[in-house]
Amino acid sequence: MSNNTVVKSAAAMKGGAREALVDIIMKQWSPIEVYILMFLILSIVFVREYPKELRRYADTTLGKAVLFGLAIAVSMKYSWLNGMFIAIFTFMILSMSPRRNEGFQAAAKPKTSVKLVADKNPWWVEAVLKENTVGFEEDDVSTSAVQDSPSVSRSNSSMSSP
């Protein structure tokens, strides 16, 4: 009987480092999944802390494709919960991405200069809206007169008979 037991255990063992590595990964997968979920949850909570440039790259067509593709791939490969958290992260980072340069962000351009407001007498609109103006980018406004286009023909509303 002991010979039979030895044969069964020898048949069950499939030697090699690959099987040992697969066994370790299978035993350790649940803690790894917990760490991944914690990282995703913290990423969702602190999505505003990501740099604006990273959020701006995420808002490009390529960035959206990569993020949505990652959400689909992770939900198919690992678990739907991880995919759902990546999708929530994707929506959050896209909603927080800057759409245009506001304020003095455009001042980084070489031809733009920022002028500080030295006079503390606010305009009426600033006082009503309780704005505290610190500076402005443009103080010159260029306008031009409206010109008629010669290609546009005018027609009279009254009909004249010959």
Image: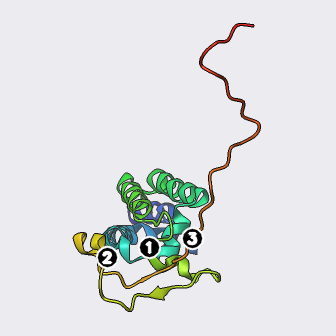
- Disc nearer the start of the sequence (2/3): 3
- Disc nearer the start of the sequence (2/1): 1
Residue 110, placed above or below residue 101: below
From this viewpoint, is residue 14 visible?
Answer: no
Circle 3 residues within 10 Å: few <14, some 14–19, many ≥20? few
Q: Is residue 84 left or right of residue 106?
A: left
> Label 1, on which residue?
24
Circle 1 residues within 10 Å: few <14, some 14–19, many ≥20? few
Q: Nearer the viewer, residue 11 or 60?
A: 60
Q: Nearer the viewer, residue 157 or 6?
A: 157
> Label 2, on which residue?
123
- Disc nearer the start of the sequence (1/3): 3
- For the residue marked with disc 2, what is the amino acid? Trp
Quarter in which the N terminus is drawn: bottom left
Residue 54, position as x, y percentages in the image: 51, 73
Residue 3, placed above or below residue 24: above
